[in-house]
Image (tube, grey):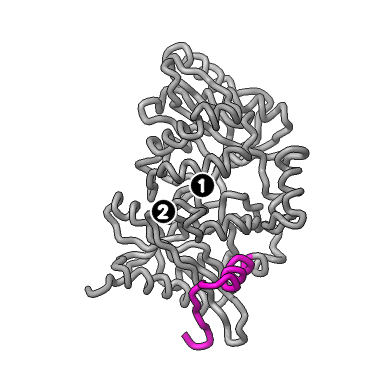
């Protein structure tokens, strides 16, 4: 495309440009929360990312005539997802660009061509390799603070997608709740009855439980089972689980994690939340050094923010609708109050997951930050 050059990310200098582009693009935006730089780099490193055992990924940069980086994108082919869902999809992620239709079109066309050369028939995104990667382009509520586990983008992004002929595949929404001073009576009552009728109980875990008691693996095996039917999900491999347990569960304040077990001590439900790191990540600009580590450690240990990110909730299929969610709320609401957490926000939840969304009703939720996965048909190679 005239005036725009697309380059594969192949060198360390290329990756530096890829990582740094969003911080320049969003330098004056008060709502953008950066990724940790090392997390982005590790995504493309087979030694650090177990998802690359079954996925292909390629990063690209867009440069203008002056040689300035003006956009980036990554093409992703998750072969396990394509096999599970009987699709031939190439995904796009890490998609950022200036407000220039030539730039966004060139980047998307590059990923479409890359996918076409490998026999893919559709392009979809923004998505990552796994459901733990950020997904869904923001299409509403651009004036609200982002979070560590969600994408933020300018309002012109979805405008470009529509002009370029991309259509909605699915939408996610987030749920925000103000923490009540006491557990709503409905939750307390259902929690009590569920404990009595189904012989389930809350277990508070610690680091020893995770590393030596096997609860890290128990939690992720539960996620595999409960999330299996969800759009685009592929089960985590043992190596992925090892990496996630090592990288993330150690950071989480275990007081904000609720595990529910049955009478056989099987994990049948889990809710994982943590105090928000949005402000700390903004102050660190996504870099641990020289001083970014201090802001993150302060938010994790010494002076946490007054709102929480509800990272995930999962219930084993045979225990759904048996009051497990009530046990989560009955346990967490008093803990949130004790630690001064005033409000909480979930990660993206599929808009048609009515069972998941209706559980929040007693807490008078606000539904916010709608996100979209776009799709477009591309011509498969040799067809």
Q: Secondary structure at mark 1?
A: loop
- Residue 245, compared with residue 377, is above or below; it is above
Queried whether the magenta region covers residue 61, the answer comes back as: no
**Residue 210 locus on image (x, y percent):** 54, 31
Instruction: Identify the residue at image location x=57%, y=38%.
Output: 249
Residue drawn at point x = 42 percent, y = 75 percent: 109
Residue 14 in view here: yes
Q: Which mark is residue 290?
A: none
Q: Residue at x 43, y 74 (%)?
A: 110
Q: Is residue 261 above or below residue 349?
A: above
Query: Magenta segment, which residues?
Result: 1-22
Which residue is drawn at the image coordinates 66% and 43% (left, top)? 276
Circle 1 crowding by C-alpha within 10 Å: few under 14, some 14–19, many from 20 = many
* Along the line of sight, the residue nearer the viewer: 148 or 251: 251
Residue 75, image x and y in percent? 44, 66
On whether residue 3 falls in the magenta region, the answer is yes
Per the image, the residue denoted by label 2 is 170
Decide if residue 366 is in sight here. no
Q: Which quadrant of the structure image shows residue 168? A: bottom left
Please give the residue where the numbered disc 1 appears in the rendered image.
Answer: 348
| Disc 2 element | strand
In space, the residues marked 2 and 1 are separated at their CA atoms by: 11 Å
- Judged left or right of residue 206, residue 265 is left
The C terminus lies in which quarter of the figure?
Answer: bottom left
Q: Position of residue 288 (x, y in %)?
A: 70, 54
């Amino acid at each position: 495309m005239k005036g725009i050059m697309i380059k594969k990310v192949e060198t360390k200098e290329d990756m530096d440009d890829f990582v740094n582009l969003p911080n320049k693009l969003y330098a004056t935006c008060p709502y953008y929360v950066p990724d940790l730089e090392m997390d982005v780099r590790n995504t493309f490193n087979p030694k650090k990312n177990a998802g690359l055992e079954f996925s292909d990924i390629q990063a690209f940069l867009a440069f203008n005539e002056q040689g300035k980086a003006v956009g980036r994108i990554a093409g992703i082919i998750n072969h396990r997802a394509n096999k599970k869902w009987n699709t031939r999809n190439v995904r796009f992620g890490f998609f950022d660009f200036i407000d220039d239709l030539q730039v966004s079109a060139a980047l998307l066309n590059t990923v479409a061509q890359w996918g076409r050369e490998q026999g893919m028939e559709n392009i979809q995104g923004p998505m990552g390799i796994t459901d733990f990667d950020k997904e869904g382009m923001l299409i509403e509520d651009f004036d609200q603070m982002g979070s560590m586990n969600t994408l933020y983008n300018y309002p012109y992004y979805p405008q470009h997608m529509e002009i370029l002929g991309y259509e909605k595949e699915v939408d996610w929404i987030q749920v925000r709740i103000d923490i009540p001073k006491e557990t709503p009576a409905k939750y307390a009552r259902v929690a009590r009855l569920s404990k009595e009728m189904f012989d389930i109980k809350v277990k508070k875990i610690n680091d020893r439980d995770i590393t030596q008691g096997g609860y890290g693996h128990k939690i992720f095996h539960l996620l595999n089972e409960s999330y299996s039917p969800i759009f685009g999900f592929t089960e985590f491999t043992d190596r992925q689980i090892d990496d996630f347990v090592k990288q993330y569960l150690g950071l989480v304040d275990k007081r904000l994690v609720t595990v529910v077990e049955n009478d056989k001590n099987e994990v049948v439900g889990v809710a994982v939340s943590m105090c928000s790191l949005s402000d700390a990540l903004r102050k660190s600009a996504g870099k641990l050094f020289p001083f970014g580590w201090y802001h993150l450690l302060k938010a994790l240990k010494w002076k946490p923010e007054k709102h929480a990110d509800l990272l995930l909730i999962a219930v084993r299929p045979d225990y759904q609708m048996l009051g497990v969610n009530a046990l989560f709320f009955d346990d967490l609401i008093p803990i949130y109050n004790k630690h001064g957490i005033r409000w909480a926000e979930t990660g993206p939840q599929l808009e048609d997951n009515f069972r998941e969304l209706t559980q929040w009703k007693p807490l008078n939720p606000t539904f916010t930050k709608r996100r979209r996965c776009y799709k477009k048909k591309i011509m498969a190679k040799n067809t």
